[in-house]
Image: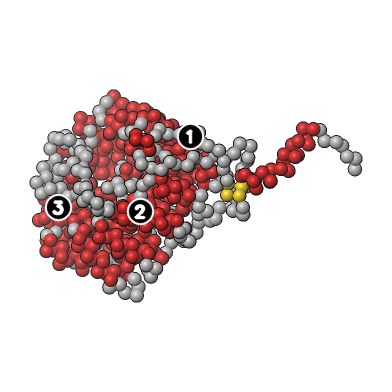
Amino acid sequence: MARFPLPAWAAALLALLLAAPAAAQVGSVGGKEGRIRHEGPTDVTAPPPPGGGGGEEEEPPLPRIASGVRFFPLPPIPPVPDSRPEGPVRMPAPLTEDGEWLFWWRLHRWSRLLGPPPPESAPPVTPGSRRSAAAPPPLPAAGAATVPDLVAPQLLAAWRERPGRAEMRAEVLFALARCGRGAAVRRALREGLADPDLRVVEASALGLGVLGGTPSQPLLAALLADRSEGRALVGRHEVPPRVRAFAAYGLGLLAPATPWPGLREAIADALEAGLEEDRRQPTPDLGVACALALGQFPGPDAVDRAPLLLGVVRDPRRHDQVRAAAAVAAARLLGRAGDGPLTRETLRAFTKRLQARGEDVRVRASLALALGRLGSIPVLAPVAVEPLVECFEDEPDPRVRHTAALALAEIGAGTHPVAQTRALPALLAGLARGPDRERGWAALGLAWAALLAQEDGRSLPLAVPQRILEAFPDRNRMQLRSAAALALGVMRHRPAEEALLAALDEIGDPRLRAELVAGLALLARPSVLLERIPAEFGRLDPLREDYQAACLGLAGRSPDLLLEILTSGMEASTAETRGEYAAAIGLGWLTGLRAAVEPLLRLWRDGRAPFAVELTAVQSLGRLAERAGRRWNESYLDLLNPWAAPPTLLGTPERPGVCDRL
């Protein structure tokens, strides 16, 4: 065969291609793992916090791919097993819609029942401030180590040892994000982003937002945008879609704590770009995450952020789940901003769309929740309450009807007279209308109104718990009994104690029994607590979610009694380690209690407990030592529409989301 000389340009191109593998070994891909090594400074910067960095060590620069080095195919990402980790790590059952009030309540109880109880002399709902700030917790004694100070170093040391199982690495990092602070914690989370297991990567991305701080912003923005810097952080040729969604949720957590308008603008730009890119995504996870994250911004930013969200709600070409998320996100923004032309126009537009029966029911359910939030602005309450009462009484779709009950609770907890003339009477009338499943939602709405009022240091009118007690059902209507008991417990209505004790002897369903135990724990006399509650904990299965619900109710009323029940059970644990499971699960609800630290550390570190107990103990340590004072994900649970929530928000039995990381 004749040989023809190559042109000079072709010879140069061939030489470059032949040299590429060598370049990869030198600078781009390192070793057998195929991990990308990076060079060069970053050009992504953020304003320094006041005082030259807020006490953190200087952060290493965001990695950047060296100029001229291209990505080569990476090894396959190790698959995530479909089987759940052994033991009660998260919600023990997948969240399925069954029409019961528990479907919604099981997501929201965790952030509400641990709030401070209303004082005995709490005034009823009367004109006054709405959503006032809670009193700050008392400061620890001088020189005393706080619970986070006791827990965070243990978690950081465990991460440096690199636990062998991915589930443990993920839980250690996320617990560290909840209770730690400083550059060492952020460095651990950055290291977790490069983990070969996606569960660890997802926990690290979300953990950067939970940790907070200015240095988290460029990292999360790079992950969300799938830029080269973000790919470098995860060591992959692309940022996995779920990781991008969790980065968006993390950015949303940064926004309300960021005092610099310019940095909030940069966060908003990243989220708005992600929301626009959602048009090309096959699933709604990214769009829902960006929309809900935009809803986290403070009230002064509402006029700038809300119009884009309102445009998404109007756009029928978008995923309906994204439109539903945009509706509640816009309502949260405008609810903080208060009354104004944009808020009033949004209320009118949302009312019209809610009443359009041709609209997607998931969007309409979110619109009902949104009307409740806008109606919590006192001057707008009379406008919002009427369409919600109409939905609650006449709407054929149960999802819209049930969210209308919760929206009426928002208005019923408010200070405008329509709270007591329209919203609360509509919910009380619902206790006597329709099947018990529907009546249970009315009872839940009244309980929710009481919890919202308590946040402002008020209570509902005494006539409300009296009416609930008068309508307390007989022994054959257990689901309604449980909902009514929970409402009476939340309202601390002491005259209901006898009725709840009688019901306790008759309810067999463990789910409903746990809610009744929680309600009884909130209102019973101390002597009744000591006499009945410990025995009830012995009847509940610690491997079920019901046990956590009972722990939560008792922790809000008598944390010392819960501590005694759990630690005594741990010492008397049988060969099946039932007591160890119970302690690992329940001690985490004693938020801020120093006495709970040592038993949890023992369950985790002494090497004798099963892996599932160790894993759950780590998760509980993060919850116990949480620095924020409230659950890290409470802002994403606010106005949550579970019927429109994708897996990254709601979670699955195999992979946790935002809502089920308790």
Figure disc tally? 3
Inter-mark Cα distance, 2 to 3:
36 Å
Residue with the mark numbered 1: 44
Q: Is residue 512 positioned above or below 57 on the image?
A: below
Q: Is residue 458 positioned above or below 598 on the image?
A: above
Inter-mark Cα distance, 2 to 1:
29 Å
On the image, the x and y values in percent for residue 53 come to 38, 38
Which of 162/480 is in front?
Answer: 162
Q: Quadrant of residue 126?
A: top left
Residue with the mark numbered 3: 492
**Element assignment for label 2:** helix
Q: Dots 2 and 3: beta carbons under 8 Å?
A: no
Q: Amino acid at mark 1?
A: Val
Q: Is residue 375 positioned above or below 402 on the image?
A: above
Quarter of the image with the N terminus in it: top right
Q: Earlier in the sequence, mark 2 or mark 1?
A: 1
Q: Dots 2 and 1: beta carbons under 8 Å?
A: no
Other residues around mark 3 within 10 Å, as few (<14) / some (14–19) / many (≥20): many
Q: Is residue 631 left or right of residue 290?
A: left
Q: Residue at x 33, y 30 (%)?
A: 302
Q: Amino acid at mark 3?
A: Arg
Residue with the mark numbered 2: 152
**Element assignment for label 1:** loop
Q: Residue at x 34, y 34 (%)?
A: 50
Q: Is residue 433 left or right of residue 638?
A: left
